[in-house]
Image: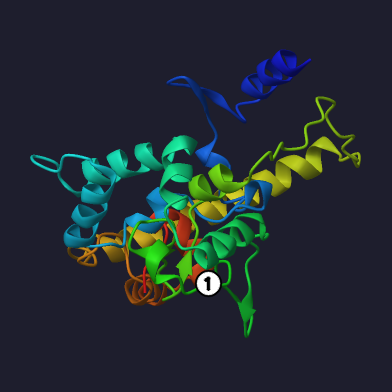
Amino acid sequence: MALAALRRLTELALIWPYADGFAAAHLSPMWPHPLNLGPGAAELLVSRNMNELRRLAKVYGIPVTGRGKDELIVALVGWLAWPENVRRLAAQAPADVRAQLAALALRPAQPFGVRGIMFGSAGVALPWAAERGLVVGSAWGVEEMPREVALALREGYVAAFDPQPPAVPTTPVEPKDAEREAAAAASDTLATITAIGGTMSGGPVPLLKTGGLGVRELRRIAKSSGQDEAPTRPFVCGGEPLHA
């Protein structure tokens, strides 16, 4: 049944074979907290500078010579993706830190809001764990546990699995209505792309030193092109996170 479910998910392009497993990163915007996990290590480490990444690499025994930032992050994430590495490292922590890490691994990582703005999961302060990458500072100034670490520390955890797809309620729609809405959406999308493209073609778009597009620059592009931030972000940032 499990193999049949995987084949069906692949047919629907919800997952696809990658390396020795399956990839599903494209689902992140729709399902940001799978299994109640926080952000991945790659998402959290991208905001760290090279000195911090090199220190982590030294802790993990990863060579840094000849590696740029992206390559170093890939190596660090690969190390954290092996549960045995994480468990062996966490076992060296003081008893109180081990207890906090175990509790944090099981805590649902749900977003919290301030005045209607959604942030990541609520952070913690664990210096010993932060120095070893078991928690990583996020863009919001708090420390979060990478999902690779949380999975490794969830002793005996087995995710719920139901191979039977849920029943999806449907509502009949007249073909002419669907065609009209599709044409209107296509027209709006084209107008948005044209406006944003016109604004961005006026000169190079400045990026942050840590990489990626800043919130302030997104707002400038949206305002200059006469668009709201929400529809502007996908065209400008794709699936990349914004940085403050």
- Mark 1, residue position: 123
In this view, 209 is above or below 43: below
Point 51% across, 54% down: residue: 39
Quarter the C terminus occupies: bottom left
Task: Look at the image and tell me whether residue 202 can be seen.
Answer: yes
Residue at the image point whose x is 44% and y is 58% from the top:
93
Q: Residues within 10 Å of mark 1 (few under 14, many from 20)?
A: some
Q: Nearer the viewer, residue 13 or 58?
A: 58
**Residue at image coords 9%, 41%:** 65
| Side (left or right) of 105 relative to 179 | left
Position of the N terminus by quadrant: top right
Rendered image quadrant of residue 11: top right
Q: Nearer the viewer, residue 137 or 177?
A: 137
Most extreme residue toward the left is: 66
Three-letter code for the amino acid on which mark 1 is drawn: Gly
Q: Is residue 99 left or right of residue 170?
A: left
Q: Residue at x 14, y 41 (%)?
A: 67
Q: Furthest-bottom residue in view? A: 115
Q: Give 188 or 26, whichever is nearer the viewer.
A: 26
Residue 49, image quadrant:
bottom left
Label 1's element?
A: loop
Vertical side of 34 occupied by 165: above or below: above
What is the x, y in percent for residue 116? 64, 80
Quick check: 173 above or below 146? above
Q: Is residue 161 above or below residue 241?
A: above
Residue 242 in view (yes/no): no
x and y percent of residue 47 in the render? 31, 62
